[in-house]
Image (tube, rainbow, N blue to C red):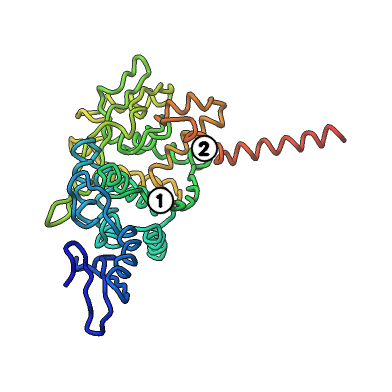
Amino acid sequence: MAKQGENIYKRKDGRYEGRYIKGYQPNHKPRYGYVYGKTYDDVLEKLEPFKLKYQRPQNAIGFSGMFSDYAIAWLEITAREKEIKPSTYGSYYRDIHNHIIPALGNKLPHMLTEADIEDFMDNLRKKGLSEGTITKIIRCTSAILSKAHEDGIILENICKKVRMPRRKKKKITVLTRVAQSALEQICEQEKDGLLPLLALYTGMRVGEVSALKWTDVDLAEGLLYVRRTVQRLNHYDDYERKTRLSFSSPKTESSERIIALSQKIISYLGEHQKKASGEYVISCKGRFAEPRVCQYRFERLLEKARIRRINFHSLRHTFATRCLEEGMDVKTLSELMGHSGVEMTLKYGESLTEHKKKAVMLLDNVYQVAI
């Protein structure tokens, strides 16, 4: 018979057998490992290193569930305590339920290893996910484990030992000056033309354009105030997934900003305001035009201008590129764009294709002078 607190038994063949929990099955039943010896003390000595390897740390909050239980609890606590935006909650929800729980949920938090995280990343790649998406999912996993470490459920955050995927730079799509001119000519003729012109001359995001009210525009001073954004987000409950529109503050604190307007866009806005009947600058049936409606209208204008289909966000890229081509300093552009730092703005320097071509053509002049 085993002594109290020890899983060591004498077998019929005279040997002693000791067992320890080394993991759990999908049905949450324990998986055991075994050691053998001629005497009770031999087995007790052999068991010690395995118990140390698989032991639970001092548990500060009395948690005894699986990693899936803790991940779900973490999401609700984070959403409640930190008051995260609905879009952030939706991103966490998808990562946890679509990827993290299916791969790691049936393990105890303290049983997770570096190998588990590395295998997790490999399987995400096999699903065809981009390195950027994989990085986002692993960061979510790491945030959960960091809280588990803080709560005393695990001894360390193993994600910090794993090399994160190398993210590939996204290619920025920018309209050429010729394409921009063609689009503007169509916009001047169409009733929905103000929509892309706003983005081309202010660099606003589609959600910011959609939520823009006439009270946010001061034509006398030539200023536009970005105060809110609207998004269509997934809404989750226990039974089904729905979508709903959500108004919130702009993307980051620096995104709530004041934009100085050029005379051209002031003129466009002035003409449009005379005909406006609602509170929103871009309207649809007397209300605001939600982002996907803006994208649909934009695509129709592209078709009329005979320009290949691009995302509305490309207009923001085009605005930034034109500003740099005309010599605007990066700090000013960063503030107009609502970036949290100039590092994000500097990426637009890579898209100055036309500017680079003109610069290289100057070499022809050098050659002619030499002759």
Q: Which residue is mark 2?
A: 348
Q: Residue 227 shows which numbered tag?
A: none
Residue 98, compared with residue 19, is above or below; it is above
x then y, percent, for residue 205: 36, 36
Residue at the right extreme, as displayed: 371
Left or right for 341, reference 157: right
Type of the residue with mark 2: Tyr
Q: Residue 135 shows which numbered tag?
A: 1
Residue at 45 percent across and 30 percent down: it is: 341
Residue 173, compared with residue 121, is above or below; it is above
Secondary structure beneath dot 1 equals: helix
Left or right for 211, reference 305: left
Could you tell me which quadrant the N terminus lies in?
bottom left
Real-space CA distance between mark 2 and mark 1, rounded to the nearest whole angstrom? 23 Å
Residue 90, compared with residue 205, is above or below; it is below
Q: Answer with the quarter of the image where residue 224 lies.
A: top left
Type of the residue with mark 1: Thr
Residue at the bottom extreme, as displayed: 13
